[in-house]
Amino acid sequence: RRIPRILLHIIIHPTNQPKTMTVWIYHERQEALLCGQHALNNLLQRHAFTPDTLSQIANQLDAMELNFMAQNNEGGVHSKDYLKRIQEGSGNVDEQGNFSVEVLRAALLSRYRLELPNILQKGILDEREITTIDGFICNKSAHWFAIRKINGRYWNLNSTLERPEVISHFQLASEVDKLRGAGYSVFCVVESLPEICTNEAMMDQGLPQYWWKEDDLLKGKTNAMTRADDPWKNVGSGRRLDGKSYNNNGAAASLDVSGMTEDEMLQMAMMASLEQQDPSSASASDSTKSASIDDNTQSYELADEPPEGTPGSIKIQFRLPNGSRAVRRFFKSETVGALYTYVGMTCGKDHRGVELRAGFPPKDLGSRKDETVEDAGLAGEMVHGRIA
């Protein structure tokens, strides 16, 4: 029998058959305490952000917070609370390079138009399986790390690990539950993360010593291939979650992103917010809104704080009017108005004189007092307060 022409073509031209795709995984190791930067870059699978870029974003957020606090009726920039906030320094980056979640959110939004909600927010896990989420950023105290889906598998990209570690789909839900039980806040990017690295040209987006060949990692090779000859020659020392240190010599090389400038990135994210923070540019509608909030005489019940781990409870972070920070648990069914009661009681003020904002850019919560904290999406959020 004669071989059909189409089969003969495939036999003679084997290049028409599909090739195995080579995938590379980007895993920055920890330098100093810059784990927030490494978590972002590992999530994005490229060297997208430098410490300078994130520090500038932190400074912009600090300016926004101070402008918000300055709009009070107790002396403005000369008020006791405002001056105390100035003395405390930045609320979004410390001297060791630890960044707040607001900085990470602003960075993702300004460059990639990606949001970073807490997984406890309504509409995240109740509408989808956890294994359909593209990536996670986990935080406890001053440590951040990323988990990212790459080529159909989830990888733990903790910057304190020597190399990426695979997490099976079956383990993912229990791993996230375990992290939350250990006190971690877990944030996520549901979809639309940048594409993974499948060729040499794409590897130019990262530092060479941090690229790992996926096949080698899956096979457990002790000499797994990276793009650099010596994968650890430029890696700095890092702090582990258990407090121990990695004492490798040298510092990680820096690489500026060649695309958008830092000013352009910041301008995109901050322009609308900064315009709203200028007291002289406040619109008549804003004044009307503030007046309606002040005139609201309704009181909102504040339930006793539920114990840690209580089903149906969430944590909310606060930057109080006096500049101090607080974290408190609320029931999901409590109203946003209860937050006003809490802040007022904490500061010794009537809740009617309190103004709260949350989100990025920050939005006034005054019109949402009757909503539940779950419906308002405040799980794991930072709420900023001032005395209006």
Image: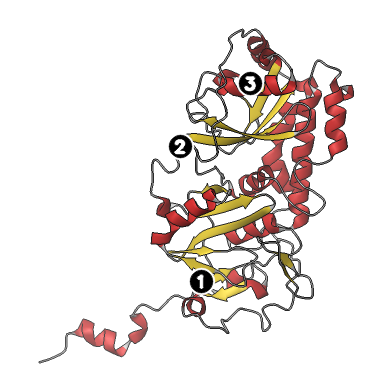
Disc 2 versus disc 1: nearer the observer = 2
Q: Secondary structure at mark 2?
A: loop
**Quadrant of res 320:** top right
Left or right for 339, reference 50: left
Disc 1 versus disc 3: nearer the observer = 3
Binning the other alpha carbons within 10 Å of mark 2 as few (below 14), some (14 to 19) or many (20 upward) gives few
Binning the other alpha carbons within 10 Å of mark 1 as few (below 14), some (14 to 19) or many (20 upward) gives some
- The kind of residue tagged 3 is Tyr
* Mark sitting on residue 14: none
Q: Secondary structure at mark 3?
A: helix
Circles 1 and 3: CB distance less than 8 Å? Answer: no
- Distance CA(mark 2)–CA(mark 3): 23 Å
* Mark sitting on residue 340: 3
Q: Which residue is mark 1?
A: 198
Write the residue at 56% across / 25% down.
Answer: 304
- The kind of residue tagged 2 is Pro
Color theme of the render? secondary structure
Write the residue at 34% across / 80% down.
Answer: 16
**Quadrant of res 246:** bottom right
Q: Secondary structure at mark 1?
A: loop
Q: Position of residue 366 (x, y in %)?
A: 61, 19
Q: Which residue is mark 2?
A: 311
Q: Position of residue 82 (x, y in %)?
A: 84, 27
Residue farthest to the right, as pictured: 78
Q: Is residue 284 in view?
A: no
- The kind of residue tagged 1 is Thr
Specify the quadrant that holds the C terminus. top right
Residue farthest to the bottom, as pictured: 1
- Distance CA(mark 1)–CA(mark 3): 50 Å
